[in-house]
Image (cartoon, rainbow, N blue to C red):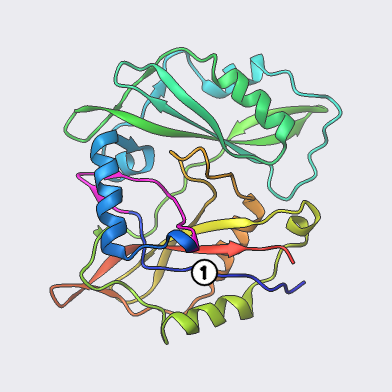
Amino acid sequence: MKKTINILFSFLFLISVGNVMGNEDAPEEKNMKYPEEAIRDMTTNLLQEKLYKDVHIVRGGGTLPECLTGNVWQYINNNVHFPKEIKLNRSDNSVSIHFIVEKDGSLNSFSIYSGSYPALDAEVLRVAKTMGKWSPGKLANGEIVRTTYLLNGVYESENNEIKLKALPLRVEKYQGEVCELAEKFPQFPGGANALKKFISDNMQYPAEAIEYKEEGSVVVQFVVSPTGEIFDVFGVVRCRHNDKCPAISLVLAKEAERIVELMPNWIPGENKGEKVAVRYALPIIFKLP
C-alpha cells in the first residue's frame, strides 16, 4: 500500500574526529541547522565524551571489546526466562542491546537500541546488565578507549523454545578511503526536490508497520563513491547517546534501505577539486496517515 510520507533530508552527516564518531541523530525540522553549525556542535560534544563506536574501531583496524566469561550468547540463553506464550511472527526478529565498555572493562549505560518483541527485548536487557567485565576496546595503535557497543542478536525458535543467536556482522563492501567531511557534498541528480520525489514515488509503507502502528525517523547511512555509486546502505534505528530519541521499527529501516539501494548514481563529493568517497546520512521520516 502506497502511503504519503514526509521526508526530511539535509546535508547533516555523521562525522569523525580522530576516529571518534558522534550520535546518529536525525535532526527535527524545527531544530534544523546548517551543516557547519551542526558539525561544530557535534564535534564539541564528541571531544567531551571521548567515546568510540564499535564499527569505527573496526574500520580503523582496532580491537573490539570482548566478553571475558566466554560465549556471550550462551550466557544470555542460559539466564533468560522468556514468556512461553510469545510466538515469533514478525518479519524481523532481531534485537540490539547498546552499552558502554569502559577502559577498565566495566559496563554501563544499557538500553534497548532496537527490538521486535518488547517482552523478549526487556528480558535480554535484564540479563545483559548482569554480565561481568569485558576486555576493553583498543585502537590500532594499542590505545585502550571507551567504546559504545551494540550486541546484535536474532530470536529463533528451537525445539519449541525461543533462543537468541548472534547476527553476523555487516561487511562493508567499499574498501577505499571514505571521507566523513567534504568541501563539496554528494548530491542526488536533480537536487533536493528530485530526491524527495524519487523517495515518494518508490516508497511502499510496509503493511506490517501499519498493523503495529509504527512510524518515526530512519537515518539511512551510505557511502557515495568517487563515481557516484552507492555502497554499504544501513538504516540507523536509534541514536546511541540520546535517551529522548526513541527506537524505530526495523521494518521501516529495511524499507528505507531498499529505497536508497534503488537510487541512481549520485553526483560525487569533492575535496580540493578531486572526487572522493563520502559517508552520507539521509534522514527519512515515516508518518502514519
Dot 1 falls on a residue whose secondary structure is helix
The prevailing secondary structure element of the residues shown in magenta is loop
The region drawn magenta spans 15-29
Q: Amino acid at mark 1?
A: Glu
Residue 176 visible in the current orientation: no
Q: Position of residue 284 (x, y in %)?
A: 54, 64
Q: Is 108 placed above or below 243 here?
A: above
Q: Residue at x 73, y 74 (%)?
A: 2
Residue 274's image quarter?
Answer: bottom left
Instruction: Name the foreground residue: 209 vs 255.
Output: 209
Which residue in the protein does label 1 denote? 261
Q: Position of residue 111 (x, y in %)?
A: 54, 31
Point out the residue furthest to the right here: 85
Quadrant where the C terminus sits is bottom right
Point out the residue furthest to the front here: 30
Q: Residue at x 29, y 71 (%)?
A: 185
Question: Local crowd at mark 1 within 10 Å, few (<14), some, or many (≥20)?
Answer: some
Residue 163's image quarter?
Answer: top right
Point out the residue furthest to the left here: 272
Quadrant where the N terminus sits is bottom right
